[in-house]
Every structure is written in C-alpha cells, then in structure tokens.
Amino acid sequence: MHTRREGGTERHRAMKFTDSPVIELQVGNTRLSLQQDNGSMHVGTSVWPCSLVLVKVLDRWARPHGPDRPNNPYADLLDFRGKRAVELGAGCGAAGMGLYLLGLADIVLTDIAPVMPALRHNLKRNKPVLHKTLKTSVLYWNNSDQIKSLNPPFDIVVAADVVYIEESVRHLVEAMAALVKSDGLVLLGYQLRSPEADKLFWELCEEVFVKEKVRHEDLHPEYAYEEADVFILRKKKDKEDEL
C-alpha cells in the first residue's frame, strides 16, 4: 500500500487542494489544520482531495439553518448522535476528524504502521479544536485479529481514496463487511485510480453492498470536481446473516 496515487495537481488546486505543507479545512464553525508530507513514500502522509470532498458534502447538508436544510435528503444519514465509526486508510485524518466534528459519538482512525506518526501528529495538532485525542489503531485489512481488536461492528465505516491497488481490493471489501453493522453504512469518498482495481472493487461490493451515489450537484460547490464521487454503501439484506 505504498504506491503513489496518480492525479492532476491543477484541478486539485481548484478545490483548495495544494502542495502546501498545511491544508486547512473548515467544518461547521471549526477549522482543522492538517500537516502533510508530499515527499514521503507513503500515500497516507498526503491529504487527498476525496477526503475533503467527503467531509464537505456532509458539512454542507449538516448545517441546521442552511438553505438546503428544508428539503434535506441526507437528514437521516447525518444523524450521528450516539454513532460509533471507524475510518480505513485514515492517512492524515481529515475525514475522521471532520466527521467527528459533525457529531459522531466515537471514531477510531486506522491505517498501516508507517502512517501512524503522521496521523497521530495531526490528531495532536487538532486536539484544541477536537477537545480530545481521537483513538487510533494500526490496521492491515487482511489481518483478522486487528479487525477483531477494534470491537466491531460499527454504525459507520469511513473511507476516502482507498481503492488504487488491485491486490488490496478484496481485503478492503472484506474488512468493510466485517466492520460495519448489518444496518450500518459505509461512507466512501472515491476517485478512479486504477481501472483494474476499480472493476474488481465494484464487482466485490456488488456481492455484499447496495450502493447509492451522491448526486454531483449535492457536493459542496467549493469542494467538488468531476473525478470525485461520494458513495453510500449498505449491506444487502440477504447478506446480513452470512457476514
């Protein structure tokens, strides 16, 4: 999971994604400050656009008095009260911290061991606005003991820009299925990185999940571009007793 993701820098700049060492993300009335290292060999030390897209679409529709609220199609989805969540491939922690600020009761941010220093640094950096240090855990998606140690199932599984290596796709889908409740959901920020990984990922998801794509016009207008999508995955009813 150390391969670099491909992507165009210019279009990322258009949505406030830059090569700057610090990325700021406004969530409600709170501003997160995310330190990244684009020179690292590990993709998890960069803040990738999909994590920002995911947080900002939820932030857009979570505003209690916003212009979109009267006809809010995501009202039930955004009721995070009492909900437990886990993030896969958390990287610098943008998505996990953002969703916590939107009302989650608890979230565990996970990634591979080499990324942990960057993740923990950003959690410490943002502790003053989070008012706590969020939980972290090393997780390799094919490690069943690590999955069990997280004490699943969770109400919500969060993942952003995690589908880019074909060899890891099956482990990813199996981890998502093992971690999410039968009536829970997966919030997925997505960008096509590898045609082979993309094809396999959706084939495997089709066996376990029903997917709903968030309409592009529903994304936050300042954090949207044509290659970024957000999906909501729910377990198929006939799979609940098998997983």
Image: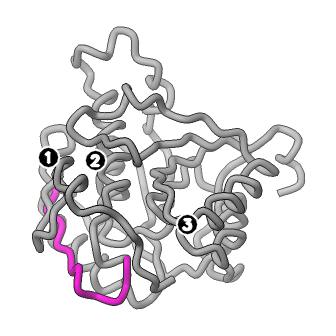
Which kind of residue does numbered mark 3 sit on? Ser
Which class describes the residues within 10 Å of circle 2: few (<14), some (14-19), or many (20+)? many
Spatial CA distance of label 1 from label 2 is: 8 Å
Rendered residue at 67%/74% (across/down)? 148
The magenta segment: 32-43
Callout 3: SS: loop
Rendered residue at 88%/49% (across/down)? 241
Spatial CA distance of label 1 from label 3 is: 35 Å
Q: Residue 127's quadrant in the figure? A: bottom left
Rendered residue at 67%/60% (across/down)? 201
> Going from the N terminus, do you reach mark 2 or mark 3 first?
2
Pick the quarter of the image with the C terminus: bottom right
Q: Residue 149's quadrant in the figure? A: bottom right
Which kind of residue does numbered mark 2 sit on? Leu
Mark 3 — residue?
Answer: 194
Which class describes the residues within 10 Å of circle 1: few (<14), some (14-19), or many (20+)? few
Mark 1 — residue?
Answer: 30
Q: Position of residue 177 (x, y in %)?
A: 71, 58
Which class describes the residues within 10 Å of circle 3: few (<14), some (14-19), or many (20+)? some
- Give the farthest residue toward the top: 70
